[in-house]
Image: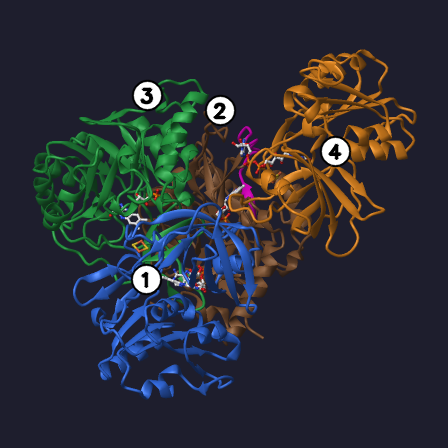
Chain colours: A orange, B blue, C brown, D green
Amino acid sequence: MKKYLIDFKIDDNIQLSSNYSLIKLSPCSGLLPEVEGGQFAQIEIPNSKETFLRRPISICFFDKKNNQLWLLVRKAGKGTESLINSISNTIVNMMLPLGNGFSYPTKPNAKVLLIGGGVGVAPLLYWGALLKAHGYDPLFLLAAKSENDLLLKDYFEEIGNVYVSTDDGSAGEKGLVIYNTILKDKTFDKYYCCGPMPMMKGIAKIAHTNSIDCEVSLENVMACGVGACLCCVEDTVDDGNVCVCKEGPVFNINRLKW
Amino acid sequence: MKKYLIDFKIDDNIQLSSNYSLIKLSPCSGLLPEVEGGQFAQIEIPNSKETFLRRPISICFFDKKNNQLWLLVRKAGKGTESLINSISNTIVNMMLPLGNGFSYPTKPNAKVLLIGGGVGVAPLLYWGALLKAHGYDPLFLLAAKSENDLLLKDYFEEIGNVYVSTDDGSAGEKGLVIYNTILKDKTFDKYYCCGPMPMMKGIAKIAHTNSIDCEVSLENVMACGVGACLCCVEDTVDDGNVCVCKEGPVFNINRLKW
Amino acid sequence: MVDLRVNIGALEFKNPVLTASGTFGYGEEFADFIDLNRLGGFIIKGTTLNHREGNPYPRMVETPSGMLNAVGLQNKGIDYFIENIYPRIKDYDTNVIVNVSGATINDYVTVCEKLNELEKINAIEINISCPNVKAGGMAFGTTPNGASAVVHACREAFRKTMIVKLSPNVTDITEIAKAVEGVGADSVSLTNTFLGMSINTETMKPYLSTITGGLSGPCIRPIAVRMVWQVSNAVKIPVIGLGGIMNGRDAIEFILAGATAVQLGTANFVDPTITIKVIDYISDYLQRHKIEDVKSIIGGMIQ
Amino acid sequence: MVDLRVNIGALEFKNPVLTASGTFGYGEEFADFIDLNRLGGFIIKGTTLNHREGNPYPRMVETPSGMLNAVGLQNKGIDYFIENIYPRIKDYDTNVIVNVSGATINDYVTVCEKLNELEKINAIEINISCPNVKAGGMAFGTTPNGASAVVHACREAFRKTMIVKLSPNVTDITEIAKAVEGVGADSVSLTNTFLGMSINTETMKPYLSTITGGLSGPCIRPIAVRMVWQVSNAVKIPVIGLGGIMNGRDAIEFILAGATAVQLGTANFVDPTITIKVIDYISDYLQRHKIEDVKSIIGGMIQ
Ligand SMILES: Cc1cc2nc3c(=O)[nH]c(=O)nc-3n(C[C@H](O)[C@H](O)[C@H](O)COP(=O)(O)OP(=O)(O)OC[C@H]3O[C@@H](n4cnc5c(N)ncnc54)[C@H](O)[C@@H]3O)c2cc1C
Ligand SMILES: Cc1cc2nc3c(=O)[nH]c(=O)nc-3n(C[C@H](O)[C@H](O)[C@H](O)COP(=O)(O)OP(=O)(O)OC[C@H]3O[C@@H](n4cnc5c(N)ncnc54)[C@H](O)[C@@H]3O)c2cc1C
Ligand SMILES: Cc1cc2nc3c(=O)[nH]c(=O)nc-3n(C[C@H](O)[C@H](O)[C@H](O)COP(=O)(O)O)c2cc1C
Ligand SMILES: Cc1cc2nc3c(=O)[nH]c(=O)nc-3n(C[C@H](O)[C@H](O)[C@H](O)COP(=O)(O)O)c2cc1C
Ligand code: FES
Ligand code: FES
């Protein structure tokens, strides 16, 4: 897919809590390029004294009708903090769409579960919408530390049924997501998962055990975002170290040495 | 004088043209410390990716009644540009008051002329007001490239008579300030001058010739602003290299090797 | 119109803007953003005799105005390059230069010999300065003898334009430059990255899997400019300058300091179109200063 | 309460935070902003035998995340210091350390002898690494022999704690550190500034009157941390770390890399209260990590 370098304008920065923002942006001019579910952007952090490189952020939703992109951002450090504090009309330059997204199940009526932890729910919103548009009936399992960190639940519910796990039990089932009841159901054809590494590894294990096809969206430190610098590698079974930014961020767990 | 490190809030940023701003600030809390005419502040540039050190800016006016400081800023590069574009309520940290300001004439009824070129008029506004408050009748000679660069003329006129030179003759007398008719008047007791180096040297020459006492406010590259780093030296007759930030920025021309 | 052409060894470059090895992939990664044919040249990533997996991750951490990397010369080896990459990139209308690394002198020589046979590879850049590998790499680049041993051997094996990329992690970089000039280098490029490290104070662990890595970006520019100035005054062969060039002004700075051409590395990550902007800036700058030929400002700093 | 005390040579410091020579004047310049008595110590500016006017201006230019300076050791000489400055600063309740420079070994020795007599000067820092002077300075600091010659002679003349400040402009800084340890240094501090330069492309002239100057600030931190880590693994004497420390996190980074104490230089220009903030941060950090004694995290990086 062709990659673009585009100036966006922040239309709306909805602070979900002191740590999370849902930022809606539209291009300063022209139409958005097509985006696949699970792709990401390399974002130039505006007005930030202390950052140098771009930051990778998943495309949370691609609103073609309104020519708008959504980003879900968690305050992790200086760059994300500066993004979260950016006011409307701030200009944000992005390289996008980057990487390879999720892939559709091979079976037409496949039963799919999208599992997101924390801010890892971000890429699943648009992917869920795409799956639905393609005739699937996606179910969601959202996990968070507590109810306050449970993100975009209302939006997910518009697409499909939502199961919830929180560490403290303030919403849904209490405990780690890997113990959620829905994961006992072995009839799923495919899992799509994005979240903290230990969670993704836990889900991958369940998928392996139950022979469920599974794709995960990996994180890594990134400089270029386009496969040029080799900073962001993940070790694969078939090809050794490959770039997460170019061959991922979505990988089928069969490729990974997990 | 005791120096302070204070957070200010921009109350008002009045863009005089695309290159100049008059910025009015008040402390985020508390009262302004006393300031002498001709002192300066070391300003932390807010939200600027490309600056590292503070920037020295003269205190243009000290409005005790409104607990407000004024800065007159010319776009010279990255830092001043960022200041000029700062919106109201931006927080700006300053070290102030720094350096030694102008000194009062020794004679009670001294006839004084304040000569400012370009953004160099900045420290003369408050100094003019102080002179007036102390019973002097300051006259002003303002110089600029053209009428558009003639700054704060209305404000100066409230304090005393204003003479003008512009390079292109679009206001006042045409030509370099050193040829302005008012400088033919040899009865002045003291000149105070701030502007580009060649202009100050020209004025100093006239002052020497006519035995007029003369103080100039020097520029230099500054890092610390408090005499600690020795980056900002000017060569003096009496003491060799001295710090402009600490022993200046105002010097009597008798100290200088001009 | 201004003349942007410069010459290095037997080669002519349509303009002095190249991309730095390891930061521009095989060029293709940037083809969506810029027209690669406009570049003076591009230098593809460090190529070794055998396949190398590079270092474990994390391989990168941001630093003030820069970044540390610990890639460790990951590449699939020279034969893979010749079979799979070369056919794809050989027909760009620009100079394609291969950056060569090795653990032993023999490694370097074998790679050079193979590259010598490729019609469209008119130049190589010998990397004796990679800080991210245990054997070879920087070890060769920090003594005049080590450097000239490698370069001498490569010179026998490679008959086209040979650039030698110097390490900045030395007391006197002019010594190394003179040594490699003495054994036949057609040009020196400097600088490679500075050896640095960074620690995550919360986990108390280094950010990089290898503890130390190579520092690049504008943070190193003042040191790199100084070295280019020193080296260009010490040798007669053309110097290629790099290290933290982020825009056209920075490129001009290196040229004024003595660089015949420049390379852009880390800047490509911040702005994937930066190379083209730099070419345009140089052209504008020359017009603004009423200079007809970029060659006339090489080393043109007024003292 | 956590224990912030550290020891270097015969001295105890109430905390590991010192100020770097040349960036903190004689301390007094910052007395309006902070309580100097809270500092672990301060190192006053480079003092030479005779009065020095330093270099012509411009002496400074900002660079990405740093600055270049070309002050050139301007000072009024040791006798002036003893008569006029020492009486004003000797009674601070902190360690006052004098940074000593010279053009010849004799210069160093004479200054050391005079300082040896000052009751309240318990330590000196021998500067063999100033990049801004023609004779002496860095010339001594770039070879093990040059360094040990100066330090050996100073050791005879000065009987209290002697710190040696190392130049980073070398291929292998551990060699120099080991050499000065061998001739009696009680501690090494690193790094001094990196030799750099910057050109104003519009005027085509260098920004500094001396063309080259010393680079400091956070831009150099990754290299300085790496050197501190290498040196602390190579010598037994305590290492004082500096180079681009801008906040408490950065100070901890140096301590984890192997520094017993740290110095803050350029950071004082950006925030004149930074020293106190760093002291408080270290204290908070230790509490947060349930560590009682700062000494227990010196070199504590987990590999
Ligand atoms: C493909 C992809 C998609 C992503 N999508 C999203 C998303 O949709 N929403 C979202 O909020 N985040 C997303 N992330 C994560 C996001 O990129 C990071 O949180 C962000 O880059 C952190 O930048 P920062 O400037 O805020 O933090 P920094 O200030 O750079 O660092 C934050 C913390 O990490 C530590 N740290 C800094 N650098 C490193 C390093 N190199 N290695 C290890 N630790 C380091 C610091 O010590 C600090 O504690 C995604 C990441 C990837 C790779
Ligand atoms: C005591 C004092 C009072 C001042 N008062 C005022 C005032 O009231 N109003 C006002 O507008 N200005 C004032 N100035 C000038 C002001 O400090 C500078 O214009 C400002 O620091 C420039 O910063 P910048 O980031 O905008 O420019 P920069 O981006 O830092 O540089 C601007 C230009 O200067 C060049 N340059 C950058 N650094 C240097 C250097 N170190 N040496 C030489 N050239 C350099 C650059 O190439 C560029 O062309 C004062 C200066 C002093 C010393
Ligand atoms: C991620 C990365 C990988 C690199 N790989 C190589 C390499 O393979 N061979 C080489 O000679 N230099 C390599 N370098 C060094 C660059 O080519 C360049 O010398 C250095 O980054 C300084 O320039 P810059 O500041 O413009 O990036 C690499 C640099 C980076 C950042
Ligand atoms: C303006 C200035 C003057 C300096 N003068 C001296 C000096 O006289 N003696 C010395 O040993 N180091 C001197 N240094 C070096 C600093 O002490 C310190 O080693 C260096 O700046 C790196 O630390 P930093 O990045 O925290 O500033 C000077 C540095 C600066 C910026
Ligand atoms: S971030 Fe550069 S290769 Fe992935
Ligand atoms: S700016 Fe530091 S002494 Fe003047």
Please indicate, yes or no, whether residue C258 appears anywhere in the rendered image.
no
Query: Which of the two marks, 1 or 3, is nearer to us in this view?
Result: 3
What segment is highlighted magenta in the picture? C44-58
Q: Is mark 1 on a helix, strand or loop?
A: loop
Amino acid marked by disc 4: Pro
The answer as to whether the residues below labels 2 and 4 share one chain is no
Amino acid marked by disc 1: Pro
**Residue D7 higher or lower than D223, as above or below:** above
Residue on which disc 2 sits: C203
Residue on which disc 1 sits: D58
Q: What element carries label 3?
A: loop
Asked which quadrant contains residue A237, the reply is top right
Mark 4 CB lies closer than 8 A to ligand 1: yes
Residue on which disc 3 sits: D3
Where residue B3 appears, as percent x and y from the top left, is 33, 49
Q: What element carries label 4?
A: helix
Mark 2 CB lies closer than 8 A to ligand 1: no
Q: Is mark 2 on a helix, strand or loop?
A: loop
User: Which is nearer the eye, C125 or C29?
Assistant: C29
Q: Distance between the residues labelled 1 and 2?
A: 43 Å
Q: Residues within 10 Å of mark 2 (few under 14, many from 20)?
A: few
Mark 1 CB lies closer than 8 A to ligand 2: yes
Residue C45 falls inside the magenta stretch: yes
Residue on which disc 4 sits: A123
Mark earlier in primary sequence (1, 3): 3
Q: Residues within 10 Å of mark 4 (few under 14, many from 20)?
A: many
